[in-house]
Image (cartoon, grey):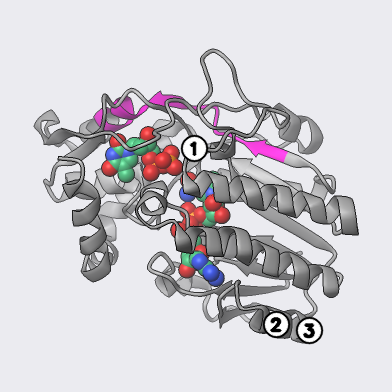
Amino acid sequence: MKLVVTGGAGFIGSCFVRMALGQRWAEHVINLDKLTYAGNLENVESVSSHPGYRFVQADICDAGAVEDLLKRERPDVIVHFAAESHVDRSIHSPAPVIQTNFNGTFTLLEAARRHQVGRFVHVSTDEVYGSIEAPHDADENYPLHASSPYSASKAGSDLLALSYYTTYKLNVSVTRASNNYGPYQFPEKLIPLMISNALEDKPLPVYGDGQQVRDWLYVEDHCRAVFAVLEKGRPGEVYNVGGNCSLPNLEVIHRILKATGKPESLIKPVADRPGHDRRYALTNEKLTRETGWQPLMDFDRGLAATIDWYRTSQDWVRRIKTGEYRQFYELNYANRV
Ligand code: NAD
Ligand code: TYD
């Protein structure tokens, strides 16, 4: 099978590419990535000489480039990870988020329709459901209630993707995963930022009271869920993917400090995120029932593996935490004092 994977130089997409190339059914994997600030070819270094792997640098919003690629390669499958994925960046600068997440998805869907690509998995997020009152969990029919430009752009692109099934019978499924963590995550999201700051003895900025709840999913569990949806998911359907691990942010931070042996005095409360969703919570019941998938990684074990990876990959972190990263970091956290 020949796959085009968009965003395969990012955190989750690169994990998917590395894992897919270990599967017999994935003979060819073409990684289509623009290499934005979040894209890093070091993330796919370990498969770069695999005979079935190819990298194409292109923007998913570039209709000509996408059209050429599909015409030339005739892939069986598109797995669409490419996105502007950070909520805080979407608050500071929404334009690229709407452009890539909505218009880029449209460009891909159009090309997939014209070239009759046999399967399209659109990778989305539980953030499209917005904040959910305890004790409820969102299933796939839960109303969409996006709070940030990021989640709104993902909700819009989910609906667009599903419309290509309803209208054109393009074989689309949508996955909505909870917060991922694991190796190679860009150190702007909660877990990699807190781990890398703790390892550098830098302050850990906690938004508001730190009691916001997220469900944590190990990145390899997420990628296995996408495999399951590719193989067994029904067209026109949405599948939630959660880690069965709901924790308040401060609890996650305490566990990181304990595991790294760093003091609680590193915790630094800062002003809250505008429109901050209080609680994400979802049920996996549909995906498990239809495909047999379940999350396998226990959170403390996954966190320990992630901390080990950041500890031994400090050069990777150091190379990222320069230039543009520093500028955004200073802007984001200066606004919160
Ligand atoms: P990431 O920011 O680490 O990587 C995104 C990748 O997309 C980068 O390699 C970047 O270069 C590429 N990209 C961005 N704009 C592009 C464009 N216009 N054309 C081509 N490539 C482009 O993101 P991630 O955390 O790996 O997330 C991947 C997907 O999973 C996203 O769609 C995101 O919405 C979704 N998701 C993420 C999480 C999470 O916790 N990180 C949870 C649920 C869903
Ligand atoms: P994040 O990793 O940005 O994911 P999302 O907003 O998509 O869930 O943030 C996870 C949670 O951690 C969220 O409640 C915001 C909070 N947070 C902090 O408290 N401090 C930080 O520096 C960051 C990046 C996030």
Q: How many angstroms separate mark 3 from mark 1 (CA)? A: 38 Å
**Residue at x 32% of width, y 52% of height:** 188
Residue 194: x %, y % from top left: 26, 43
Magenta highlight on residue 243: yes
The answer to whether 57 is drawn above or below residue 188 in the figure is: below
The type of residue carrying mark 1 is: Ser
Residue 272: x %, y % from top left: 28, 33
Q: Which mark is residue 71?
A: 3
The type of residue carrying mark 2 is: Leu
Q: How many angstroms separate mark 3 from mark 2 (CA)? A: 5 Å
Q: Are discs 3 and 2 less than 8 Å apart at CB?
A: yes
The answer to whether 302 is drawn above or below residue 185 in the figure is: above
Q: Are discs 2 and 1 less than 8 Å apart at CB?
A: no
Q: Which mark is residue 147?
A: 1
Q: How many angstroms separate mark 2 from mark 1 (CA)? A: 35 Å
Closer-to-camera residue (98/123): 98
Which residues are drawn in magenta? Answer: 239-254
Q: Find numbered disc 1 in the image and state the secondary structure of the residue it sits on.
A: loop
Mark 1 within 8 Å of ligand 2, using the beta carbon: no
Query: Considering the image in quadrants, where does the N terminus appear?
Result: bottom right
Q: Residues within 10 Å of mark 2 (few under 14, many from 20)?
A: some
| 3 or 1: mark nearer the eye | 1
**If you read the primary sequence from the N terminus, does the residue marked by circle 2 or circle 1 appear first?**
2
Magenta highlight on residue 324: no
Q: How many marks?
A: 3
The image quadrant that residue 265 belongs to is top left
Query: Considering the image in quadrants, where does the C terminus appear?
Result: top left
Q: Do we see residue 17 in this rendering?
A: yes
Q: Residues within 10 Å of mark 3 (few under 14, many from 20)?
A: some
